Amino acid sequence: MFDTICDLIARDPDYSPRSWILDTLIRVLNGQLYDILPYDFHDERSAAGEYIPLRKRRPSVRYPLCRVVVEDSVSLLFSEGHFPTIDCLDRATQGSLASIAKDSRLNMIMTEAAIRGSVGSVAILMRVLSGRIFFQVLETTYLTPVWNPKEPDTLLTVMERYKVSGVQLSNNGYDVPDLNSDYWFQRTWDGDIETWFVPSPVNNGLPVEIDLNRTVSHGLGFVPVVWIRNLPGYSSTGDPNDGMCTFRAAIDTQIEIDYQLSQAGRGLKYSSDPTLLLKEPLGADSDIIKGAGNALVVSEKGDARLLEIGGTAAAAVIEYVRTLRELALEGIHGNRASPERFSGAQSGRALELMNQGLLWLADNLRITYGEVALLTLAKMIVRASLRYSLRTSAGNILSMDPTTALSLKWPRWYPTTAADRQLDAATLATLINAGLISRESAMKAIADTYDIDNVANELAECATDQAEG
């Protein structure tokens, strides 16, 4: 069914097949896949009286299974209680990165990137404006990266090119000769310049004239774009610049669920107002008015009855949909735990075992969006501090050491219970007294549990408190 719907989506020959595939996956993620279908689900006959097949109707019930799995996995990745801490030996650098991450709302940026990148890939653009760091999430549908052949993980350039209407350009400050025409919009990023081009009419070819008013020289020495491939494995588009789509294996099942639930709803509506069958000859009064307060009078040989249907079909559909949901969630490692099975408070370890599939998915996403993307952004910030005088809303940021090794410290998947925290405290105290770990290492182990942003400052305050005691 997914392929049937995709065949109705127009393909622009000026774009690559990759762009078309990403566009269809974005439609699924945003709940816009059925917008291309011309009829509502309750439309059974066209204006000409022809029967409308189900494949041309938009389902009346839509279960966003794919979106649910994506948001569940991302919530375990970059939500407020799961965002990692950027760690390094230089405490000044660590504090500066923490301040910039908070000032630039980096957790919100990474959450948006992980959701939008679930189709296969996403990019994050870094800009330095008036000394402050800003990030912007870019969909890669119309982006083309060029990699350094000697360093395959380093970008040489990134080009953005797509069609835009004259009205949109005019609304964004462009002086266009024809508002009714379509234009090519293009810009590129390299290690020194963000180049904007003057939009060119589609019929005149690709843009070649540089827009000097909008072109900016950033001088960072690197492309200020992080390219993120979603999941390791087979590319959803067949292009090596994209990773595997998070929800591709569940799309067909989601469509089947939507149509089955729509059909079940259609049956329930029919049951509340079934069709009336009349067998001639009718009685003297042939005017038919349906309703509980009106009786039908037929002759001796006539008959009247309601064409009712049994309720077993609806129950069978619900059971079938429940099975489809289980299979789809298992295929894409979604959360299959039912809240009804919880008998009481569960420990963090019990929740991990219950949601093992979802944790497996989030653990893989930690590699691409955390160890690759987030660390790359942090390194870009460090390098930018050597070029610009950075600041946050709280104050100025000193230049950071680019040779400092950066790492991420991830919190636990689920909050700990009071019993878990008691066991942790006893274990850490035993290890410290035995000389097996330092107080700093112990503090790091519980920093996320007790919302400790700066371990060094917390240790100093603890030492002060002990001295005063």
Image (spheres, rainbow, N blue to C red):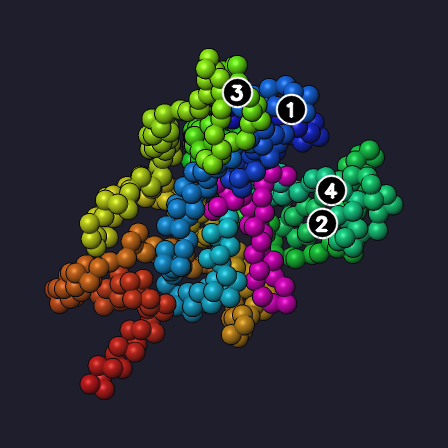
In the image, residue 400 lies at what x, y percent? 49, 65
In the image, residue 410 lies at what x, y percent? 34, 54
Q: Mark 2 or mark 3, which has the lower sequence index?
A: 2
Q: Mark 4 or mark 2, which has the lower sequence index?
A: 4
Report how far apart the C-alphas of labels 1 and 4 lie in the structure. Answer: 34 Å
Instruction: Judge depth for marks 1 and 2 and give the one in front.
Output: 1
Report how far apart the C-alphas of labels 4 and 2 lie in the structure. Answer: 18 Å
In the depicted structure, whether residue 244 falls above or below residue 362: above
Pointer 2 residue: 195
Report how far apart the C-alphas of labels 3 and 1 lie in the structure. Answer: 35 Å
Q: Mark 1 or mark 4, which has the lower sequence index?
A: 1
Task: State left or right for residue 397 relative to residue 166.
Answer: left
In what element is the residue under mark 3? Answer: loop
Pointer 4 residue: 164
Viewer-nearest residue: 90 or 29:
29
In the image, residue 124 lies at what x, y percent? 55, 50
Q: Residue at x 68, y 51 (%)?
A: 194
What amino acid does circle 4 point to?
A: Val
In what element is the residue under mark 4? Answer: strand
Q: Which mark is residue 283?
A: 3
In what element is the residue under mark 2? Answer: strand
What amino acid does circle 1 point to?
A: Ser
Report how far apart the C-alphas of labels 4 and 3 lie in the structure. Answer: 67 Å
Report how far apart the C-alphas of labels 2 and 3 lie in the structure. Answer: 84 Å
Extreme residue toward the bottom, this view: 468
| Mark 2 residue crowding within 10 angstroms, few (<14) / some (14–19) / many (20+) | some
In the depicted structure, whether residue 133 falls above or below residue 264: below
| Mark 4 residue crowding within 10 angstroms, few (<14) / some (14–19) / many (20+) | some
Q: Quadrant of residue 390?
A: bottom right
Viewer-nearest residue: 174 or 269:
269
